[in-house]
Amino acid sequence: MKTLMLTVAAAAALTAGAASAQPYGYGRQGMSIEQRIERIDFRIDQGVRSGQLTRREAYALRGQLNGVVRLEARYSRNGLSEWERADLSRRLDALNDNVRVARRDDDRRYGYNDYPRY
């Protein structure tokens, strides 16, 4: 009886640890396509507000994001197949990389009378 209780307790402890290790909301495995789109949109807005993205860069990135949103709407009319889900994921990965590169390329948006200091 004690060994059965110990086995059940050990199994419960292992499954609780495995459940807490699942990526909820972090990484692309734990996020839906809509959540990834919202996150990329937020990162573009954040880049504009901080001055890391110029207006031209933000316009181009939002155009790419809108293209992915339109494609997702077209794909989801009949439900997303695995191929369509993989295609959207690949496009969102590329767009995420484009946002990261654009925010770090040192193209700055300067305000009034604020010139770059070299």
Image (cartoon, grey):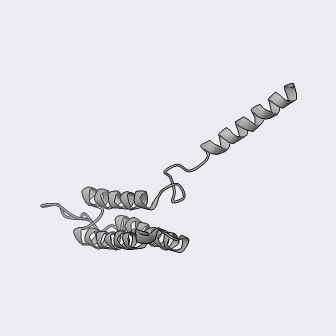
- In the orientation shown, which residue stands out farthest toward the front? 78
On screen, residue 116 versus residue 1, left or right, reads left
Front in this rendered view, residue 108 or 18: 18
Is 43 placed above or below 87 here? above
Residue 113 locus on image (x, y percent):
12, 61
- In the orientation shown, which residue stands out farthest toward the top? 2
On screen, residue 84 versus residue 16, left or right, reads left
The tally of labels here is 0
Quarter of the rendering occupied by the C terminus: bottom left
| Residue occupying image coordinates x 51% and y 57% | 27
Residue 4 locus on image (x, y percent):
84, 30
| Residue occupying image coordinates x 35% and y 64% | 103
On screen, residue 5 versus residue 19, left or right, reads right
On screen, residue 20 versus residue 56, left or right, reads right
Residue 80 locus on image (x, y percent):
48, 69
Front in this rendered view, residue 66 or 41: 66
| Residue occupying image coordinates x 40% and y 65% | 100
**Quadrant hosting residue 41:** bottom left
Front in this rendered view, residue 110 or 84: 84
Quarter of the rendering occupied by the N terminus: top right
**Quadrant hosting residue 51:** bottom left
Is 87 placed above or below 45 here? below
| Residue occupying image coordinates x 66% and y 40% | 17
Residue 106 locus on image (x, y percent):
33, 67
